Image (tube, rainbow, N blue to C red):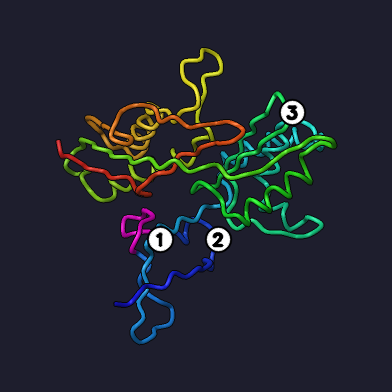
Amino acid sequence: MRVPTLASFQADSIGSASSSADAAGVPNVHTVTQPVTSLSGVTVDNIDVFAGSDVESNIALAARARLKLASLSTNGPKGAYEYAALSSQRLAPTLLTPLSVSQVITREADFVDLTTGWIYAWIANANGAPSVDDITATNEVIQAYAVPVGQTAFTDAATNVPVAAVVEAWVPAAANTTATEAIFQNALIAFVRSVRIGGATDEAGGAYSHVLLFDAALGSLFVAAAAANIAVEQITLTLDGDVLDIPLAFSAVLAEVAVLSPAVPSVFLHSV
């Protein structure tokens, strides 16, 4: 019996174009099966999803640009932490000891311990928890660009919380295609990647606290259908087999971030 060898690799091109996409354009497993150089008796396969992320969308760039104002008061305002983390891929090579961030940090959330005054900067990339090297580099950027003199701050990865998503949609027969499946899959993937570390909290009314909002996830599917001019009759969604919000911890010792597992949600279409 031959034991497979697990190997590390780096994509030739940065961004989502280097994802292990299937025929429908959705990042998936078992899609990288052709080696660049053929060797006798050697085969390759990706047992996990390779999901590259583009450096920044227009919306993300606009949000980071607004954070720039906070960063101008160096080592001061809270927003400087988020700005430094989201900019760490660009700033890490400029450190006194240059470092690198392999996958852009897309989310940062601060927890402030009111007893000690310490700040815990939790970070995640589009796929969830960053690598150890990316945590180290991002921490060095935050320490250099955001942490005030006399302040103690720690940087660590958010903990992945696997979420199994199943979508059912009733669509016109002409729209019952793999392309429509991909629209719903990509919409849900994009939504989960946008959920903040520690989830959403109703700051005004307290109706919910630190959750992935089920209604928001379901709404992303209707928005995607409308954008693609698909006249859906009905869409149902389950997250971990239920129709409830997903709780996400947020504290000094644990901060959680939602990740889809499987990485590609199941979509079932019905013709009407």
User: Circle 2 sits in a helix, a strand or a loop, which is it?
Assistant: loop
List x then y, in percent, for residue 25. Answer: 36, 55
Between the residue at mark 2 and the residue at mark 3, the CA separation in whole angstroms equals 38 Å
User: Quick one: label 1, few (<14), some, or many (20+) residues within 10 Å?
Assistant: many
- Residue type at numbered disc 3: Gly
At label 2, the amino acid type is Ile
| Residue at the (23%, 36%) spot, across then down | 169
Q: Residue under circle 2? A: 14
Region rendered in magenta: 21-30
- Mark 1 residue element: loop
Query: Which of the 4 quarters of the picture holds residue 13?
Result: bottom right
Disc 1 to disc 3, C-alpha distance: 43 Å
Q: Residue furthest right?
A: 149
Magenta segment, prevailing SS (helix, strand or loop): loop
Give percent across and percent down for residue 63: 62, 36
Q: Quadrant of residue 119?
A: top right
Q: Residue furthest left?
A: 272
Q: Residue at x 22, y 30 (%)?
A: 233
Quarter holding the C terminus?
top left
Residue behind mark 3:
117
Q: Are marks 1 and 3 in contact (CB under 8 Å)?
A: no
Foreground: disc 2 or disc 3: 3
In this orientation, which residue lies closer to the viewer: 12 or 171?
12
Which residue was labeled with disc 1?
A: 20
Nearer to me, 26 or 33: 33
